[in-house]
Image (spheres, rainbow, N blue to C red):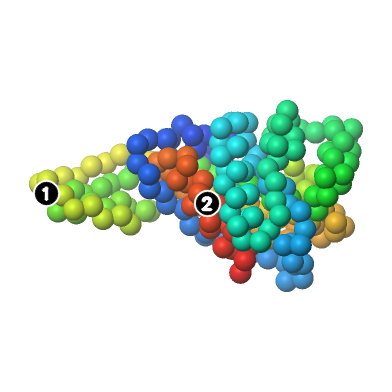
Amino acid sequence: MKTICRLFGTVVALILFSNCSSVKVTDSWRNLEVPDIKGKKVMVVSKTDDEVARIRFEKDLVQHLNKNGYQSIESYIMFPKSSPTKELSESEIIEIKEKLKNNGVDVVIVTVLKDCEEYTKTTTRNNSYYSVYPSYYGLGYYRGFYGYYGTVYIESDPVTMITTEAKKYTLETLVFDLTQPKEKQLLSVIITEIDDPQTLVGVSIDFSKRVVKELNR
């Protein structure tokens, strides 16, 4: 059964006891004329109403960006009382624009949950354990930023087939350059897939590494 999850923070509901995660980049698009954003101040946004997930993902992505020569800051620090999923009024948009400008922010990186798929996962336990891990982009599809706002484990158990329900998340990360005209603000799109996440921390760190690696290509 396939369902659409509306909140990025639903990842938190799947926290179990393992420290492994499965994050991979499944697709990406880049403006061939994309400028170098390392010389510009970046704000990182995770569009979720779950404050724990928002802080964790923003902090880890900022940490990995800064380690790789970027200058970035979390949106929850700049806008601690705002919700990134809230629909903004015209006056609120103007206020955000002014604050970003006053703080020297030219680039915004936004991550949003696009899809959540439920599926049945089968594992086999014998002398080994394993998990089964089951574009095109046009600029016209996106508005400007303000409009958008296996593992091996040796074991001696007898052969056992275990079937469980799992979830696979698809995240979309978009990079906007606010110094460009509205129709040219989108610099790149990165699609990542998180398969049956086990811990928020493990997933967040792995996700951040994948996104930064893709940005550095």
User: Badge 1: few (under 14), some or many (20 or more) residues near its Cα, within 10 Å?
Assistant: few
- First of labels 2, 1 by sequence position: 1
Residue at position x 37%, y 53% in the image: 133
Left or right of 165: which side holds 200? right
Residue at position x 85%, y 56% in the image: 179
Mark 1 is on which residue type? Ser
| Placement of the C terminus among the 4 image quadrants | bottom right
User: Against 33, is 111 above or below?
Assistant: above
Q: Which mark is residue 214?
A: none
Q: Which mark is residue 207?
A: 2
Viewer can see residue 172: no
- Residue most extreme to the top: 81
User: Badge 2: few (under 14), some or many (20 or more) residues near its Cα, within 10 Å?
Assistant: many
The residue closer to the viewer here, 103 or 85, is 103
Left or right of 117: which side holds 151? left
- Determine the secondary structure under disc 1: loop
Q: For the residues marked 2 and 1, what is the alpha-carbon distance in whole angstroms?
A: 33 Å
Mark 2 is on which residue type? Phe
Residue at position x 30%, y 39% in the image: 164
Quarter assignment of residue 41: bottom right
User: Against 81, is 106 above or below?
Assistant: below
User: Against 9, is 157 above or below?
Assistant: below
Quarter assignment of residue 56: top right
The residue closer to the viewer here, 73 or 57, is 73
- The residue beneath circle 1 is 156
- Determine the secondary structure under disc 2: helix
Q: Position of residue 32 (x, y in %)?
A: 73, 71
Viewer can see residue 133: yes
